[in-house]
């Protein structure tokens, strides 16, 4: 079945819209289960903010290593879909070890092991999705928005569920979602990326990486994700401390992703009118504003609503533009490595953000912690403004 607006690709190949979308639905449902609630679950188990920051940082640190390994393997073998399926199965099996023990050392092992396989999945699937889309890459956001819908459903349902039931059921919910990822991966047909633009398949990855603006872009990716550290690690606990219920907190997380969905729906038009550089620059500047609002004025509900709506920029427009930039910057045989490096540096930045947030939260407080996040986003805006020029990239066609 073909979704509206997703017409036949060249050579009579149809875009498998619903099959691709179902995978994003379950994959980001898992993110919806972990980003708002993983720290809350560790707090429920009695860990300090420093230990919570460390446990949350471990999957992000693993994201620094695993995507590059799996990305190289995917480019070398071409068996990207097999890697996606293998990674999905091993993610479920390794996370299931959480039922064995709740000691810090054991949970650290579980976080590292399941993340090693989980981070094998998305970069390879992004390549598969773009291969199905071929020259219709501006329609990526129409598929990716189903990941946002999965996130929304998860945070709303789990927020209400944890108002009624104990957080002890948290691991069970996560395992069910992981099973959904496996099922969706079995439904997706394979596809291989084609050569595009002026990037030759034989060009080396390192040569393409040294192209003007590419390294600067990746530095900004790390800074952007570092700025999200306090948000993904402590926002739920922060809002609970301010007196918001878990149900309301779930709805607030969902509001951010609704804004993200609306952004995805309009991204094809935005990327036609504005260059990738301008979209990225606006995303970084709005991120800096968002973290200041969350750190200083979150007790005012209308400010909190505004801050969550800004998720449309800090994730929605940033991610869509970043995926497009990576797709344009690397040849067919380096797509997996390009996407993997994007994931790895996102993980590096996210891990650093979670670690500094964990150590500074009790020592220096939420205001200072979110202020550091704002500085990181501003640094990314300065770098992208000076190092990425219009002639180095341009807009999607």
Image: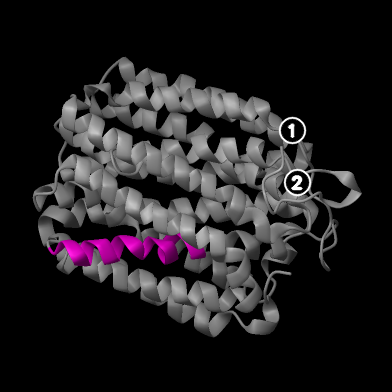
Measured as percent of width and height from the top left, residue 45 is found at: 17, 29
Q: Is there a contact, CB below 8 Å, between mark 2 and mark 1?
A: yes
Crowd rating for badge 1 (residues with CA inside 10 Å; few <14, some 14–19, many 20+): few
Residue at x 56% of width, y 69% of height: 217
Q: Which residue is mark 1?
A: 189
Disc on res. 232: none
- Up the image or down, 306 lies above or below 79; here it is below
Give the number of the disc on residue 132.
Answer: 2
Provide the secondary structure element on which disc 1 rests.
loop
Count how many numbered circles sit on residues in the image: 2
Pick whichever, 195 or 310, lies toward us.
Answer: 310
Quarter-wise, where is residue 55 in the image? top left
Which residue is painted at 32% across and 16% down in the image? 99
Quadrant for residue 305, please give it: bottom left
Residues in magenta?
300-317
Q: Nearer the viewer, residue 222 or 320?
A: 320
Image coordinates of residue 298 in percent, x first then y, are 17, 62
Task: Name the foreground residue: 33 vs 326.
Answer: 33
In this rendering, is residue 76 above or below 225?
Answer: above
Residue 45 seen in this snapshot:
no
Q: Quadrant of the N terminus?
A: top right
């Amino acid at each position: 079945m073909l979704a509206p607006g997703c017409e036949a690709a060249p050579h009579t190949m149809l875009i498998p819209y619903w099959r691709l979308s179902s995978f994003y639905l379950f994959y980001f449902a898992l993110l919806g289960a972990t980003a708002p609630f993983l720290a809350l679950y560790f707090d429920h188990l009695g860990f300090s903010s420093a230990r919570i920051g460390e446990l949350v940082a471990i999957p992000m640190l693993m994201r620094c290593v695993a995507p590059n390994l799996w990305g190289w393997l995917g480019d070398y073998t071409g068996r990207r879909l097999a890697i996606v399926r293998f990674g999905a199965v091993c993610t479920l099996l390794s996370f299931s070890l959480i039922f064995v023990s709740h000691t810090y050392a054991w949970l650290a092992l579980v976080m590292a092991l399941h993340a090693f396989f989980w981070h094998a999945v998305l970069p390879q699937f992004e390549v598969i999705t773009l291969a199905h889309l071929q020259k219709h890459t501006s329609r990526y956001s129409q598929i990716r928005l189903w990941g946002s819908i999965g996130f929304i459903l998860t945070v709303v349902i789990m927020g209400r569920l944890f108002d009624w039931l104990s957080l002890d059921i948290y691991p069970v919910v996560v395992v069910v979602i992981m099973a959904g990822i496996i099922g969706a991966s079995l439904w997706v047909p394979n596809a291989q990326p084609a050569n595009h633009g002026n990037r030759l398949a034989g060009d080396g990855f390192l040569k393409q990486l040294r192209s003007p603006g590419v390294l600067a872009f990746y530095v900004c990716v790390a800074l952007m994700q570092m700025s999200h550290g306090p948000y993904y690690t402590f926002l739920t606990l922060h809002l609970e401390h301010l007196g918001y219920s878990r149900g309301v907190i779930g709805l607030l997380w969902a509001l951010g992703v609704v804004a993200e969905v609306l952004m995805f729906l309009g991204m094809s038009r935005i990327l036609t009118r504005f260059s990738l550089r301008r979209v990225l620059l606006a995303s970084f500047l709005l991120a800096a504003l968002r973290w200041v609002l969350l750190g200083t004025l979150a007790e005012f509900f209308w400010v909190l609503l505004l801050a969550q709506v800004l998720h449309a920029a800090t994730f929605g427009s940033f991610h869509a533009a970043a995926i497009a930039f990576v797709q344009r910057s690397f040849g067919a045989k380096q797509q997996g490595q390009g996407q993997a490096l994007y994931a790895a540096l996102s993980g590096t930045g996210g891990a650093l953000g979670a670690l500094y947030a964990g150590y500074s939260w009790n020592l220096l407080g939420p205001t200072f912690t979110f202020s550091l996040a704002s500085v990181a986003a501003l640094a990314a805006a300065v770098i992208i403004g000076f190092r990425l020029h219009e002639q180095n990239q341009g807009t999607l066609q």
